[in-house]
């Protein structure tokens, strides 16, 4: 994908997300759950994602949710429900959530901001910063900052990457097409990442993941 083609794809994706983001019609309606029910769901989320949503390393790295863009979280939870994004555990978690509960959970995590867990090799950070800010033109990879912002905080449907676990980011990027975009009839802005993830080498992915994992 050439840079000008990517720009067009970004515009299309923005329209798709703006028109079809789940749950937004319900955000103005009365919540269909009680405060204790919300607290119970939050407690359940935190058993895997950390008490402050900072992520957790166990048998597999569990992603940071703290500070994440609510629209992105809602989109991804809906993707699990619709099996556009494949993860058996998250399907079981998400498919029982009402639209208003999705919104409430996503909004809660947006306001959390614990310190990143870090742990990535620091010698990779400089290269990762360069890739994030400048891209890899010879591989037709644009700067990550174009969509995720100069501080990697994300915006709207584009996720926050700052402070994300480096091993989680690595796993997701090198396996992108095996998990994401499983329903070609219902694309979202994750579609933009498919050629980018494919064109990065594993070494480059490790570097940019290391850089992002230390950002606050």
Image (cartoon, helix red, strand yellow):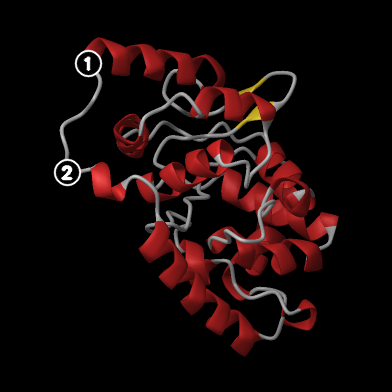
Quadrant location of the C terminus in the rendered image = top left
Q: Which residue is mark 2?
A: 28
Quadrant position of residue 193? bottom right
Q: Is residue 87 visible?
A: yes
Q: Residue under label 1, please give it.
A: 34
Picture layout, residue 123 above or below residue 120: below
Label 1 – label 2 distance at C-alpha:
16 Å
**Pick the front one: 20 or 104:** 20
- The answer to whether residue 48 is above or below residue 150 is above
Quadrant of the image containing the N terminus: bottom right
Q: Earlier in the sequence, mark 1 or mark 2?
A: 2
Q: Judge the density around disc 1: few (<14), some (14-19), many (≥20) Cα neighbours within 10 Å.
A: few
Please tell me in which quadrant of the rendered image residue 58 appears. Answer: top right
**Residue at image coords 46%, 67%:** 16
The location of residue 208, given as percent across then percent down, is 67, 56
- Secondary-structure class at tag 2: loop
Give residue 209's mark: none
């Amino acid at each position: 994908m050439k840079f000008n083609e990517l720009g067009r794809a970004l515009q299309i994706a923005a329209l798709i997300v703006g028109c079809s983001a789940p749950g937004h019609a319900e955000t103005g309606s009365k919540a269909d759950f009680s405060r204790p029910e919300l607290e119970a769901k939050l407690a359940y989320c935190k058993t895997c994602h950390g008490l402050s949503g900072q992520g957790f390393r166990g048998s597999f790295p569990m992603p940071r949710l703290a500070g994440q863009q609510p629209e992105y979280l809602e989109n991804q939870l809906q993707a699990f429900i619709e099996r556009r994004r494949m993860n058996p555990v998250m399907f079981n978690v998400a498919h029982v959530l009402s639209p208003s509960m999705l919104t409430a959970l996503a909004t809660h995590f947006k306001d959390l901001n614990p310190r990143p867990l870090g742990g990535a090799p620091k010698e990779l950070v400089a290269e990762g910063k360069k890739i994030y800010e400048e891209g890899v033109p010879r591989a037709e990879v644009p700067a990550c900052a174009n969509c995720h912002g100069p501080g990697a905080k994300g915006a709207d449907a584009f996720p926050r990457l700052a402070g994300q676990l480096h091993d989680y980011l690595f796993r997701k990027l090198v396996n992108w097409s095996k998990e994401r975009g499983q329903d070609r009839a219902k694309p979202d802005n994750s579609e933009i990442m498919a050629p980018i993830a494919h064109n990065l080498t594993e070494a480059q992915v490790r570097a940019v993941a290391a850089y992002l994992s230390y950002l606050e």
